[in-house]
Structures are given as C-alpha cells and as structure tokens.
Image (tube, helix red, strand yellow):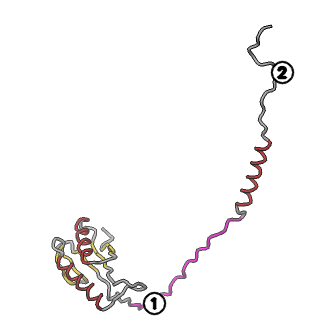
Amino acid sequence: MGMSTGGSKDGATPNINVTPLIDVLLVLLIIFMIITPVKPSKFEAKVPAEPKKQENLVVEPNPLSLVVTINPATRGLSLNNENQGTIEEPDALTNRLKEIFAQRERDNVRRPNSNETEKTLFIKSPRSVKYGDVVKVIDAVKMAGAAPIGLQIDDLSN
C-alpha cells in the first residue's frame, strides 16, 4: 500500500454556477434601460427679436457714471474730463472721489435694485499704458472706496 500524492481521477472538480450572476446582470440591464429616457428632452433657446432701428436715437450717458481716463502722453488722470493729478500722484483723484462718494451718501444716491451707495467707477486706458500704471490707478480708486471697478480699453486697434 503506497501513499498516493496526487488527487484521484474520480474526484469532483469545482465548478462556478454563473446562472445567478447572469440573472443579476439582466435585472441591472432592465433597470438601466427603464431609467434611461427613450427620447432626450430638448433645450429650447429663445433668441430675442432684432430691435427696431431708430434713426435719430440719442443715448444720453448716465449722469452718475464715473470714468477715470489715463492719458498715456502726459501720464495724467482725469475724472469725467476734469484733470485730477497724475499716475505718480493720484491723491487729487482719491480726494475728489471721496468727496463725490460722501455727497452721494448724504443725497442717498443708491444703485438700482440695491440698498448700496452708487460707487461704480470705470477706468479707461489705451493699451499703450503699462500694466503697473493701471494697477496704481486701481489702488488709488479703491482707497477712495470705489466698488465695483470696471476696465475699458480705449483703442482696440492697437
């Protein structure tokens, strides 16, 4: 009687029953088919109609608009076409803006649909002005309390 080291040929080999796995996969497939819409909903974008052209339409600027213009030749600053110092010394601009904002606070001038004092300001500068100079002007108007501040490019052709 010798010892056998291997398995017998008559022994059962392990088998995996895949029937329950297939059943689960079919159920998941049916669930995903039901969840997925058959016809995707469409997104309707309404384009506004072209406005009627009015030939002699005169648009008046908002009297409350504040525009600081940077002159690249003289490096001067102007607030609504009034000279207010230079880029190196913007104190005159800052003081004038503080006066305007204080006056608006006293007169109760508010932003439309808001309870905040109107302190919107635009900085208009040509592309030839250095970035650092524009930042100096932004800092000066922020010190005066202007917010929000918009930037405008004067000459788009350069």
Instruction: Describe the element under mark 1 as helix, strand or loop.
Output: loop
Residue at label 2? 10
* Residue reaching furthest to the top: 1
The answer to whether 90 appears left or right of 152 in the picture is: left
Q: Is residue 146 magenta?
A: no
For badge 1, the amino acid type reads Gln
Q: CA distance from mark 2 to mark 1?
A: 100 Å
Residue 94 position by quadrant: bottom left
Please state which of the two labelled residues, at mark 2 or mark 1, is closer to the viewer: 2
Q: Give the main secondary structure, helix, strand or loop, of the magenta stretch.
A: loop
What x and y, as percent, mark residue 132?
A: 23, 65
Q: Please provide the residue range marked out in magenta.
A: 39-58
Q: Nearer the viewer, residue 158 or 149?
A: 149
Q: In the rendered structure, which disc, 2 or 1, sits on the residue that comes first in sequence?
A: 2
Up the image or down, 32 lies above or below 156; here it is above
* Residue reaching furthest to the front: 1
Q: Residue at x 73, y 52 (%)?
A: 28
Q: Residue at x 22, y 85 (%)?
A: 99
* Residue reaching furthest to the right: 10
The answer to whether 149 appears left or right of 46 in the picture is: left
For the C terminus, the image quarter is bottom left
Q: Residue at x 79, y 47 (%)?
A: 23
What x and y, as percent, mark residue 4?
A: 76, 13
What x and y, as percent, mark residue 24?
A: 76, 48
- Circle 1 residues within 10 Å: few <14, some 14–19, many ≥20: few
Residue 82 position by quadrant: bottom left
For the N terminus, the image quarter is top right
Instruction: Describe the element under mark 2 as helix, strand or loop.
Output: loop
Up the image or down, 81 lies above or below 32; here it is below
For badge 2, the amino acid type reads Asp
Q: Which mark is residue 54?
A: 1
Up the image or down, 89 lies above or below 105; here it is above
